[in-house]
Amino acid sequence: MSASNYEQPYIDNIVVGYHNDKVIVKQDDGALFFCEIPENLIMPGETMAPRDLTSISVLPADEQEEIRIKYADS
């Protein structure tokens, strides 16, 4: 089995908090994503696989703005 068959750590997908039952993830470039996961399953500071994330751009505009205000500088 080659090394390419192993998953690489997702150091740039950092959980920064929660908003309306969604975990909020920030990438190194500042992009914000979410995933609907119960709060007790993952803690801020942990990393997540990119395949589990959805851009906040699919959320209603007011919810996107709330998330940006709360987590853009995290």
Image (spheres, rainbow, N blue to C red):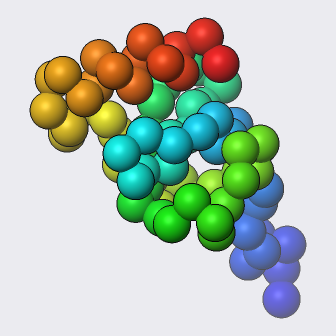
Residue, x 71% and y 44% (percent of image)?
Answer: 44
Q: How many marks?
A: 0
Q: Position of residue 68 (x, y in %)?
A: 41, 17
Instruction: Say which of 33 and 4 sits in front.
Output: 33
**Residue 51 visible:** no
Measured along the vertical axis of the image, is residue 27 above or below residue 3? above
Give the quadrant of the C terminus: top right
6 left or right, relative to 39: right
Give the quadrant of the N terminus: bottom right
63 left or right, relative to 14: left
Residue, x 57% and y 60% (percent of image)?
Answer: 39
Measured along the vertical axis of the image, is residue 46 above or below residue 52? above
Q: Position of residue 7 (x, y in %)?
A: 73, 68
**Residue 63 visible:** yes
Residue 9 falls in which quadrant of the image? Answer: bottom right
Q: Position of residue 34 (x, y in %)?
A: 42, 46
Q: Residue furthest bottom?
A: 1
18 left or right, relative to 63: right
Instruction: Say which of 27 and 21 sits in front.
Output: 21
Q: Residue furthest left?
A: 60
Residue, x 59% and y 39% (percent of image)?
Answer: 17
Residue, x 40% and y 60% (percent of image)?
Answer: 36
Measured along the vertical axis of the image, is residue 52 above or below residue 2? above
Instruction: Say which of 51 and 39 sits in front.
Output: 39
Instruction: Say which of 27 and 72 sits in front.
Output: 72
Residue 12 falls in which quadrant of the image? Answer: top right
